[in-house]
């Protein structure tokens, strides 16, 4: 990861009002956290391999992203990213109001770091409400759909 990629992540954090970010990949680790006024909250510095300047290393809590959380009758986002109701702009939405879903039913996609993640319902029920607009940013734990259990 070079400095250009890190600057792009910081821009995405600002644009989407994301306050925390963490990435660990192949021996590389970066943690970013915005301060109360949108600026950085420096704690220390870590030198990046190949980077010309040090990047602030900030301690943040890591949220699990392995599965979709189900709270009551809500399907919530398992990660920060961009919410998409369909696999492509030309395709129909995965689910609509009134659609019956099971634990393995794909209900949407969340794009994070240019990776499209299929999100499964992980609950049995009927979709009663779609809570997020297509192509809008979502936060970890944000409700995406209301589901009436069956």
Image: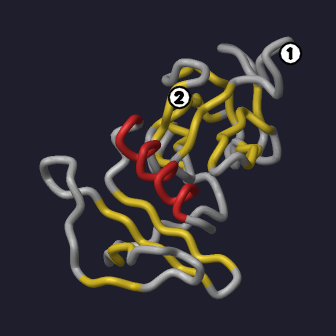
Residue carrying label 1? 91
- Front disc: 2 or 1: 1
Residue 29 at x, y = what percent?
53, 79
| Residue pictured at 68% horizontal, 33% vertical | 125
| Residue pictured at 40% horizontal, 85% vertical | 46
Disc 1 packing (10 Å; few <14; some 14–19; many ≥20): few
- Relative vertical location of residue 110 with respect to residue 146 in this rendering, above or below: below
Residue 48 at x, y = what percent?
51, 81
* Residue 83 numbered mark, or none: none
Count of numbered badges drawn on the protein: 2
| Residue pictured at 67% horizontal, 28% vertical | 84
**Quarter holding the N terminus?**
bottom right
- Relative vertical location of residue 136 with respect to residue 13 in this rendering, above or below: above
Q: How is the image coloured?
A: secondary structure
- Relative vertical location of residue 109 with respect to residue 10 in this rendering, above or below: above
Task: Say whether disc 2 or disc 1 marks the residue closer to the N-terminus.
Answer: 1
Residue carrying label 2? 146
Q: Nearer the viewer, residue 143 or 123?
A: 143
């Amino acid at each position: 990861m070079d400095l250009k990629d890190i600057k792009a992540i910081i821009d995405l954090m600002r644009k989407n009002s994301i306050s925390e970010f963490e990435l660990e990949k192949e021996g590389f680790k970066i943690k970013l956290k915005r301060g109360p006024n949108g600026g950085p909250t420096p704690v220390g510095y870590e030198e990046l391999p190949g980077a010309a300047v040090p990047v602030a290393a900030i301690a943040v809590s890591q949220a699990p992203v392995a599965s979709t959380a189900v709270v009551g009758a809500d399907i919530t986002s398992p990660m920060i990213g961009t919410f998409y109701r369909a696999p492509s702009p030309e395709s129909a939405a995965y689910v609509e109001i009134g659609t019956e879903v099971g634990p393995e039913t794909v209900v949407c996609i969340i794009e994070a770091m240019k990776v499209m993640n299929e999100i499964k319902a992980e609950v049995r029920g009927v979709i009663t409400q779609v809570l997020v607009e297509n192509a809008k940013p979502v936060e970890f734990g944000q409700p995406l759909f209301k589901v009436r259990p069956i």
